[in-house]
Amino acid sequence: MSFNRLEAGDFVVSADSITAGLWTDSEIPTISTFFTSSTQAAGASGNYYLNVFSNAATSSLEFAVTYGNQLGSGSELYNAAVDGKSYSSTIYGQYRSLVLGDENAQFVFGGVTSSDFWVISIDRNRYKESLLPGSTTLFISSSLGGIMSLTDNSNAVTSVQFNDAGRVFQLISGSAGTVFTGRNNQGYSDASGSYGWFLPDIATYILNPRALGSLPAGGGISLNPTTGSNSNGQNPRQIYEAIKGGASFTANSSETITSDYIFVRPRSSQYNYSENPSFISGSTGEVLFPSFINNPTTYITTVGLYNDTNELLAVAKLSRPLQKDFTKEALIRVKLDF
């Protein structure tokens, strides 16, 4: 066995972005059927959120929907003697901590502050790293019969905003990252704000009820949460029915694959002899064939990568043996993905 110390110039790092379908059937970028579990909805977790599946099988969990309200409205109180402490206030506080990182901060959608919101949270098993900006097209409907298509404004911004959840994009009226023709350039009304936030790094959509409850220029929908105090407004069910009625949700996942390329260079004078029993005698150490003394030939099949304490860290197998003698040099590229 022979060793060569690798130099700094033998290492090259490359990063590639890989996109894939988001849903259970990753070959299909769009789901158009939506189901909930009556068991989950009737259980303790049903007070907080609804799980949404793309078919009747529970293995097809795609995302969850929920509703948060700063004042605790739109859901029952934990204790009738403690005002404002309800399921919706808990959801609001959880997302405020996760997204804003400040219990005094407020959600501002396109310049308009909102004290409540709906959330679409993609199941963690559906993506590896994040969602792909510009790939979302979400159709939602209302009892009035209107249907609106939402997307993010990642293709229209020159600088990206960040908060504790990572990148932040506004949800706008449009499709696949493009504002619909006929809307204003920003894709939402200044009066009601954007339709919410798209947070690709935590695979979450936060929807602004103020915008969804207003009919934008050119038509749209009217979707308002039920915010009566101390009552169960079924608001997670409301946004679920709106998504189900729209019958189309398109999005892709995105993953950055980092590759470490290591170049191994056997020089003409190196790796021409072998300790393999087919090359030398195990008992005497003599070369078995006289022609191999001055004109040896070996075949490289494996590259091992070791650290400074001679611990084997990685092994690379060549697709076929590489012939080596004093007249040949080789350049072997080893690729490590992580």
Image (cartoon, helix red, strand yellow):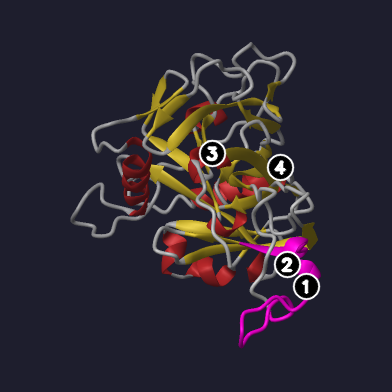
Residue type of the residue flagged with mark 2: Ile
Q: Which residue is mark 2?
A: 293
Residue 181 screen position, x and y as percent: 75, 15
Q: Which span is picked out in magenta?
A: 277-303
**For residue 23, which quarter of the picture?**
bottom right
Say which element carries label 3: helix
Give the distance between the C-alpha atoms of the residues marked 1 and 3, in whole angstroms: 66 Å
The earlier-in-sequence mark between 1 and 4 is: 4
User: Number of numbered discs present?
Assistant: 4
Residue type of the residue flagged with mark 3: Pro
The earlier-in-sequence mark between 4 and 2 is: 4
**For residue 162, which quarter of the picture?**
top left
Q: Nearer the viewer, residue 324 or 305?
A: 324
Give the distance between the C-alpha atoms of the residues marked 1 and 4, in whole angstroms: 69 Å
Callout in the foreground (2, 3): 2
Whether tag 2 and tag 1 are in contact, CB under 8 A, the answer is yes
Say which element carries label 2: helix
Say which element carries label 1: loop
Callout in the foreground (1, 3): 1
**Is residue 105 in the magenta section?**
no
Q: Which residue is mark 3?
A: 200
Specify the quadrant that holds the N terminus.
bottom right
Q: Which residue is mark 4?
A: 250
Image vertical order of residue 259 relative to residue 184, above or below: below
The earlier-in-sequence mark between 2 and 3 is: 3
Neighbours of disc 2 within 10 Å: few (<14), some (14-19), many (20+): few
Say which element carries label 4: strand
